[in-house]
Image: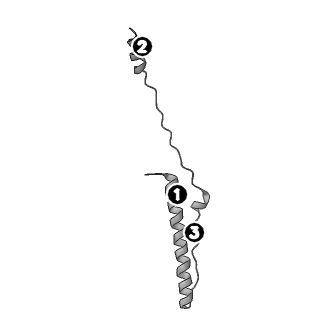
Amino acid sequence: MMILPICLTACAEPRTEYVPVKPEIAADLLTPCAISDRQAKTYRDLAVLATEHLGSAHCANGKIEAIGKSLGPV
């Protein structure tokens, strides 16, 4: 007789409701990285331009990694 109440409570399924959660991403991660519009007239200018573009690529890759960490594993 004591087992009967335990069996009856097991039949009452609690309803599970899933709510989608939108991850918060910092506003600075959604702003574009600056890209230089420098005109290269000498080899030195070309080297400076390449360095600026490399800096922009590092900026963009850093933002992509930070957003990936915010979103979690896919």
Q: Amino acid at mark 1?
A: Ile
Dot 3: what SS?
A: loop
Task: Give the residue number, with chain letter if any, for mark 2.
Answer: 5
Q: Quadrant of residue 34?
A: bottom right
Residue at 57% over, 87% down: 45
Q: How many angstroms separate mark 3 from mark 1 (CA)?
A: 14 Å
- Callout 1: few (<14), some (14-19), or many (20+) C-alpha neighbours within 10 Å? some
Indicate the position of residue 52 as horizontal and vertical percent values: 56, 78
Q: Is residue 44 above or below residue 72?
A: below
Indicate the position of residue 73 as horizontal and vertical percent values: 44, 51
Please indicate, yes or no, whether residue 40 appears anywhere in the rendered image.
no
Tell me which label, 1 or 2, sits earlier in the chain.
Answer: 2
Indicate the position of residue 63 as horizontal and vertical percent values: 54, 63
Residue at 53% over, 76% down: 53
Task: Give the residue number, with chain letter if any, for mark 1.
Answer: 67
Q: How many angstroms separate mark 1 from mark 2 (CA)?
A: 50 Å
Residue at 53% over, 64% down: 62
Please indicate, yes or no, whether residue 67 appears anywhere in the rendered image.
yes
- Tally of numbered tags: 3
The nearer-to-camera label among 3 and 2 is 2
Q: Is residue 66 above or below residue 24?
A: below
Residue at 52% over, 75% down: 54
* Image quadrant containing the N terminus: top left
- Are circles 3 and 2 on residues that touch, CB within 8 Å? no
Dot 1: what SS?
A: helix
Among all residues in the image, which is located at the extreme front?
2
Q: How many angstroms separate mark 3 from mark 2 (CA)?
A: 64 Å
Q: Which mark is residue 33?
A: 3
Q: Amino acid at mark 3?
A: Cys
Tell me which label, 3 or 1, sits earlier in the chain.
Answer: 3
Indicate the position of residue 44 as horizontal and vertical percent values: 56, 89
